[in-house]
Image (tube, rainbow, N blue to C red):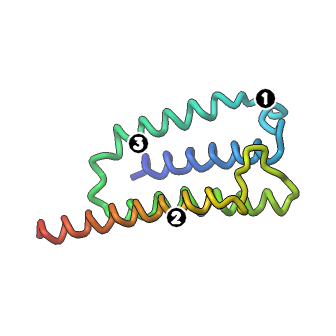
Amino acid sequence: MKTYWLIVAVLLINLCTLLVNDYFPGTLSSLGIPTWILFAVIALMVVLSALTLRPRREKKRYMIIFPVLMIVVPLLVLAVLTLLGGESRNSISLSSPSLWVGAAATLWIFWLEYLRASKKEAEDT
């Protein structure tokens, strides 16, 4: 399960770093971090999670924890960046309806998946 939390942490750090760079352009370049590296690490984490975490899907609680963390943490970061006076260059903001529709759709899809897994588990017992 350590791998799971490592993947979640790396994905959240990368996503939040990209959001900071979007709201305050030039942040990554001033730190000497090329943007492509963050995208490469995200791709690597997605592949790693597909390879290593697939067998662990029987733990249903992680089917809820992952999407909630991946939505709530970036939304909190967006709120903080907005309060700090940043402005998104890519229209990713708390006032964007597409952000809220996407977040709601993602949570709904994962919730349906959780219900299916619960139903299957109940049938298997």
Residue 50 location, quadrant: top left
**In terms of secondary structure, where does tag 3 sit?**
helix
Q: Position of residue 96 (x, y in %)?
A: 69, 58
Residue ID for mark 1 = 32
Residue 52 location, quadrant: top left
Q: Is 51 or 19 nearer to us in this picture?
A: 19
The CA span between labels 3 and 2 is 23 Å
Name the residue type under label 1.
Answer: Gly
Q: Nearer the viewer, mark 1 or mark 2?
A: 2
Question: Crowding near pointer 2: few (<14 within 10 Å), some, many (20+)?
Answer: few
Residue ID for mark 3 = 49
State whether residue 69 is above or below residue 89: below
Q: Residue at x 30, y 54 (%)?
A: 57
Q: Residue at x 72, y 56 (%)?
A: 93
Q: Position of residue 47 (x, y in %)?
A: 42, 35
Q: Residue at x 77, y 35 (%)?
A: 28
Residue ID for mark 2 = 104
